Amino acid sequence: MTRVVYIEYSGNRIEADVAAGLSVMEGARVNNVAGIEAECGGSCSCSTCHVYVDPAWIDRLPAKLPMEEDILELAHEPDPALSRLSCQIEISDDLDGLTVRIPAR
């Protein structure tokens, strides 16, 4: 299991163990993290799983694919450097300690 730190908009910090192969979004849903709606179920067709990746982790993630870039334009207050769709970040052992912040909406 890989530890992922979710920081809800309220400031509540949730440290969750997420199995390799799941997405950050799936880990949030399993662990009842508030603010990650994931209306499309992880098919990269909405922006309701938008998160801000902690700057210390952003360069350790795979690059955004063009489809993710397009969908992020629909997100609430996207940050070009830190915004990601949590459904597009697959958990691996290399991401142990990954920290993401959840936007206001």
Image (cartoon, grey):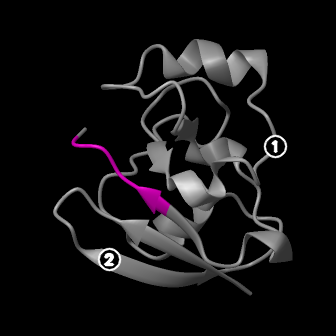
* Element carrying mark 2: strand
Residue identifier under label 2:
13
Bin the neighbour count of mark 1 within 10 Å (Cα to Cα): few under 14, some 14-19, many 20 and up.
few
23 sits to left or right of 52: right
Q: Amino acid at mark 2?
A: Arg
Q: Residue at x 40, y 26 (%)?
A: 78
Q: Quadrant of residue 3?
A: bottom right
Q: Amino acid at mark 1?
A: Pro
Cα separation, mark 1 vs mark 2, equals: 25 Å
7 sits to left or right of 83: left
Q: Residue at x 58, y 68 (%)?
A: 27
Image quarter (top left, top right, bottom left or bottom right) of the N terminus: bottom right
Magenta region, residue range: 100-104
Main secondary structure along the magenta-highlighted residues: loop
Reply yes or no: does residue 7 show up in magenta.
no
52 sits to left or right of 85: left
Looking at the picture, tell me which residue is in the foreground, 6 or 56. 56
